Amino acid sequence: MKKHLRLWAALICLLCLILTLGGCKKKEDPNANKGANGEFKFTKPVTVIVPFTAGGPTDQMVRVLQPYLEKQLGVNVIIENPAGAGGAIGTMEFLSKAPDGYTIMFGAPTNVVFRPLTSGTDYSYEKDFQAVSMVASTPITVAVKENGPYKDAKTLLEAIKAHPDNFSYANAGNGSITDVAFQKLLLKANLKVKAVPFSGTADGYTAVMGDHVNALVCNLTEATGKEGIHSILNLGSPANTKEGKEIPTCDQLGFKDCVTDTFFGFYYTNEVPANAVETFDKAVGTALQDPECVKKYAAIKQTVTYKNAKDFDAYLRSFIKSTTESLQALDLLVK
């Protein structure tokens, strides 16, 4: 009997040992990614999550940068596109990844700012993210049909003032960046018109060309090159592209504090080490100085607007504050 008990005891100990060894994970060396001076050193591929459709404006921005970024980081850069729900699905997927510096998000105001403020999400910039690098920005503009009744911005605003009930504009969704950009100006001018939401710029463009709406509010780069329409009012910062320099801004028309730009940039979760942020940001800044990279951005009508992590964070917090105030005034802020 004692012999059997000893045998069972031995078997139980052996089983416990096997379970213990099997459940043990190899501890990560905290210095594995540190260079000689304590900087973060990338040693394996980096995954960039773009929470929008492949081939879209946000995705296109990071794919131009991809080869130049790989050169600076010394590793491959893999791009994934878990799109849906205005970028919220991919953003949540990004937040579920390990904060080891090897997964980063490339986003736009839609998923980082507007979704949390207008729809309500489990995440917010202040709570969950840290800015890494701004890559580019482009102003929001009002585009109308060529050879139509609106010759310039002054004509457009006079027409709206005279007959506000007869004017409508296409946007990317009520409470979206394109909607709020125009609403900011309308609030300043004490005007109210009909906003018509569409799933994207392509559908809005079709509506303008079919005379179903009077104007399309979209990124300057999206309006540029489309046949039959042209931008006549810049709702953002002064454009320094050839196509945008002649378009008057809200400031030039006498409406202050109406600036709304679409900006594109990289984000880490707030748990990623500071040295990883610094290394990645430095790689982006250097990559954006490559003349070939700048040339390729110019080919898609984009101007590089680099901001480092500190400046990008300050810009974001200011933008979120002003956008929150505008959404509250429009009764579009999530309850």
Image (spheres, grey):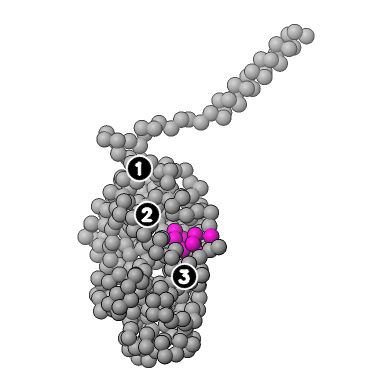
Q: CA distance from mark 1 to mark 2?
A: 14 Å
Q: Secondary structure at mark 1?
A: helix
* Amino acid found under the numbered disc labelled 2: Phe
User: x%, y% of residue 135?
Assistant: 32, 59
Foreground of the two, 318 or 81: 318
Compare residues 80 and 136 and report the one nearer the observer. 136
Residue 32 on image: x %, y %: 36, 34
Amino acid at circle 3: Ala
Tag of residue 329: 3
- Looking at the image, which residue is at 43% across and 81% down? 191
Q: Foreground: 219 or 189?
A: 189
Residue under label 2: 266
Question: Real-space Cα distance between discs 3 and 2?
Answer: 30 Å
Residue 149 figure quarter: bottom left
Residue 176 visible in this rendered orientation of the protein: no
Mark 1 burial class by Cα count in 10 Å: few <14, some 14-19, many 20+: some
Q: Which stretch is magenta? A: 111-120
Residue under circle 1?
A: 274
Q: How far apart are the alpha carbons under marks 1 and 3?
A: 37 Å
